[in-house]
Image (spheres, rainbow, N blue to C red):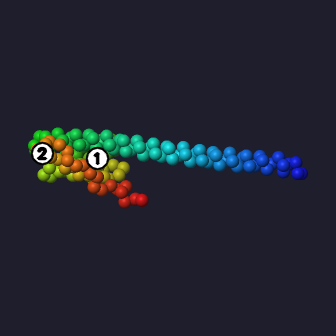
Amino acid sequence: MQTKAFIMVPFLLLFTAMIALLGNISTDVFIQNTELKQSIRVDSFSLLEIETISRIKKEFLSFEPNDFTYEAGEWIISVRFGEETAEIEYVGPETVSAQLDYDMVMENVLDYRIIDSSLSDTD
């Protein structure tokens, strides 16, 4: 009986250590996959912002900016122009509002900021 316990104790300790190691590895892989998915979402939204800002600049360069709406994938982007400003609303998986300030003299974007996001209220 004592020889069985003598063999079982190291085996159980080794087995417990292996389970703990596999748990840590799986947690790290899960975190990396989650970060990768979030990174891809941010990158795709950044490309959407670049396209929108480019269209807004073209409208301002025409000196008669017209409001417009367009679809890009799962997003619907609405732009309303004010005097040297553009109010942008991105509606898709989240709703994001932004504002762009434009300098008509220098023909340059002065400021672009996210005003409100449906994700900003979550902790």
Secondary structure beneath disc 2? Answer: loop
Instruction: Locate residue 120: give its quadrant.
Output: bottom left
Quadrant that contains the C terminus: bottom left
Q: Is residue 65 visible?
A: no
**Residue 78: x %, y % from top left:** 23, 48
Image position of 37 (left or right of 102):
right
| Tag 2 residue | 104
Mark 1: few/some/many CA within 10 Å (<14, 14-19, 20+): some
| Tag 1 residue | 76
**Which residue appears farthest toward the right when viewing the image?**
1
Under mark 1, the amino acid is: Ile
Q: Earlier in the sequence, mark 1 or mark 2?
A: 1
**Residue 37: x %, y % from top left:** 44, 44
Image position of 38 (left or right of 64):
right
Secondary structure beneath disc 1? Answer: strand
The residue at the point 84 percent across, 49 percent down is 6
The residue at the point 27 percent across, 41 percent down is 50
Inter-mark Cα distance, 1 to 2: 27 Å
